[in-house]
Image (tube, rainbow, N blue to C red):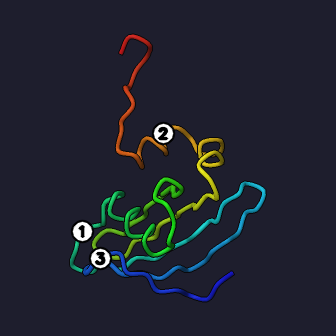
Amino acid sequence: MMSEVKVKISDKVQGVIESEADNRILGRKELQVTLFHIGAPTPSRKELLDGMAKVLQAKKEQLVLRKINTSYGAGVSKIQLNLYDNTEGLKRYESRHILDRDSGTKQKKGGKNA
């Protein structure tokens, strides 16, 4: 566990790493981050992944943004982020829809004929 570490995603988005858990079994670090974006919209997934990769000095391909929770009108978001030791573990343990969401690709909805 680390003390609160300040992060700067962009000029309008700063935050604090609230908690960091080292999950050695799955080969990842699980982070809880509170972001402050007062007067600005909720940052995009791409912007958050790029900024957190820079802050954590990690490869963007090893980060997974699990969840963004923003209270209406508050300008404060809580995110859950996983940082994997390698991309093999990431592909093994993360759901395909989460990986597609982070990469910006969309799956076709519906059955086989969709």
Residue 85 location in percent, x, y? 64, 59
Res 92 → quadrant = top right
Residue 67 location in percent, x, y? 48, 58
The label shown at residue 10 is: 3
Q: Residue furthest bottom?
A: 3
Cα distance between the residues tagged 2 and 1: 24 Å
Res 38 → quadrant = bottom left
Q: Amino acid at mark 1?
A: Pro
Q: In the image shown, does 81 or 63 lie closer to the viewer?
A: 63
Secondary structure type for disc 3:
loop
Callout 2 environment at 10 Å: few (<14), some (14 to 19), or many (20+)? few
Cα distance between the residues tagged 3 and 2: 27 Å
- Callout 2–callout 1 Cβ contact below 8 Å: no
Q: Amino acid at mark 3?
A: Ser
Q: Which residue is mark 1?
A: 41
At horizontal 43% and vertical 41% (from top left) the residue drawn is: 100
Callout 1 environment at 10 Å: few (<14), some (14 to 19), or many (20+)? few
Q: Which residue is mark 2?
A: 97
At horizontal 61% and vertical 58% (from top left) the residue drawn is: 84
